[in-house]
Amino acid sequence: MTDGRRRLRVCFVANGRTPHGVTRAEALAAQGVDVRFVTIGPVLPTTLAALSTPLPRGPLSALRAFAAFFRDIRSFEPDLLHLHYAGGRLGTLAHLSAVHPLVVSVIGGDVLPEQHEGGLPEAERRATGIILEDADLILAKSDHLKSRVLEMGPFASKTEVVRWGIDASIFRRDDAGRARLRARFGCADSDRIILSPRGLQPLYNIDLIVEAFARVARNDPFARLAITETGASPAYAAALRTQIASLGIENRVQFWGRFDRSELPALYSAADVAVSVPRSDGLPQSLFEAMACETPTILGDLAAYKELAAPGEGVLYSEIQADALAAILASVSPEELRALGARGRQRILGVADLSAEAKRVVAFYEQLAARPRRRRRPRVSEALSLLPRSL
């Protein structure tokens, strides 16, 4: 992009309320791409040119929001459109914009229906199928997600694995942040903090972590469980509090709330070990972040994780059962955890560096932009009938 050519103009469509899309769009801009972030609803603070319209409150405001969304895309005259999450209303609207080439990032729940309570509605599954079929390039965050994409259609020739990764200059051990957060929540330096960093939803089996922790706490007076509250389900949170009370561990478990992007290195550094045992997963950003901050993670024994790290490379694997998880938590010494965390940072820097992955994506962009441009018509009537109810 430094040889005098016009910068590629990329319209990046993603949920602006979560950091992942914003962070990845910023990484692309850092590679010299002219990025406009377009969405419906709020956008986290960002250095990007970001356009959004308020969340609609009724049919008329929805029509206005959709019209504004299309104007925000077309006024930019992008060379291509990058959709981050192959589903939902934003995905269907991005398809209806008819901008070509179309790049689609697959990140988890869009192709893993088992991640949704009660499964993914058929209309949303069909919408995702339309989007993937129409895409010129599909970027899957893991080999596991790529295999699920290929189950949906003959997309092998246009699907690449891009892990995205982390900015290692931001996500690193933060001892000052560790001390600050521990002081905020009344934890001593000698306390052993076990962190649950995932969303407060049934998918992530936080209740199983609580059950395992109760067994550990019987024999370890220094053990403490910290539960973050991102994306909390009120009913599930209430059920967890009831469970904690019934186990008699209220004074050993804390709900630490939500954390801004800037606070995440301190959060991971405050913990001695993180635990992530969902029933289904792609390749979670929280794992990358913990590894980069030298915080070891105990993971559920899911095949999706093992392409990233073998046992001992910043992670340990457990059966998704309370007994097995408790046994691992009780058996690993502080010295072993520190050594495990240091190996995790080395591993993640080698396989999931955000800058290097963004550079790969820009190379894909340039290949697409160099091809003869084909015109396409979105399947308007079908897409409109599949518009999901929620963003």
Image (cartoon, grey):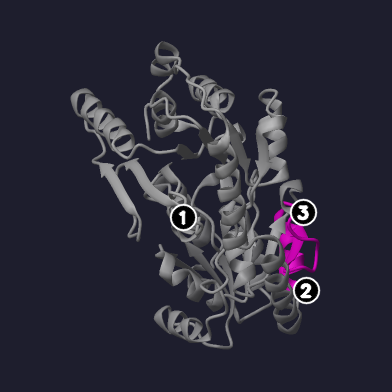
* In the image, residue 261 above or below residue 83: below
Going by the numbered disc 2, the residue's amino acid type is: Ser
Looking at numbered disc 3 in the image, what kind of residue is underneath it?
A: Lys
In this picture, residue 1 sits left or right of residue 278: left
Q: Is residue 320 left or right of residue 83?
A: right
Residue 50 lies in the magenta-colored region: no
Q: Mark 1 and mark 3: span between their CA atoms?
A: 43 Å
Please tell me how many numbered marks the rendered image carries.
3
Foreground residue, 144 or 66? 66
Q: Quadrant of residue 317?
A: bottom right
Disc 3 element: helix
Front tag of 2 and 1: 1
The answer to the question of whether label 1 and label 3 lie on touching residues, with beta carbons closer than 8 A, is: no
Which residue corresponds to the image point at 43% horizontal and 49% vertical from the top-left? 6
Which label was assigned to residue 306? Answer: 3
Image coordinates for residue 198, horizontal then vertical, percent: 54, 56
Q: Is residue 204 visible to us here?
A: no
| Residue that label 2 marks | 331
Separation of disc 2 and disc 3 at Cα?
Answer: 22 Å
Q: Tell me where residue 263 appears, x and y as whole percent.
A: 43, 71
The residue depicted at 62 percent of the width and 52 percent of the height is 360
Q: Is residue 318 above or below residue 115?
A: below
The relative height of residue 131 versus residue 51 in the rendered view (above or below) is: above
What SS does tag 1 mark? loop
Amino acid type, residue under disc 1 in the picture: Gly
Residue that appears at 44% across and 26% down: 95
Q: Which residues are magenta?
A: 308-330
Would you say the residues marked 2 and 1 are in contact, meaning their CB atoms lie under 8 Å apart? no
Mark 1 vs mark 3: which is more N-terminal?
A: 1
- Other residues around mark 1 within 10 Å, as few (<14) / some (14–19) / many (≥20): few
**SS label for mark 2:** helix
Q: Which mark is residue 4?
A: 1
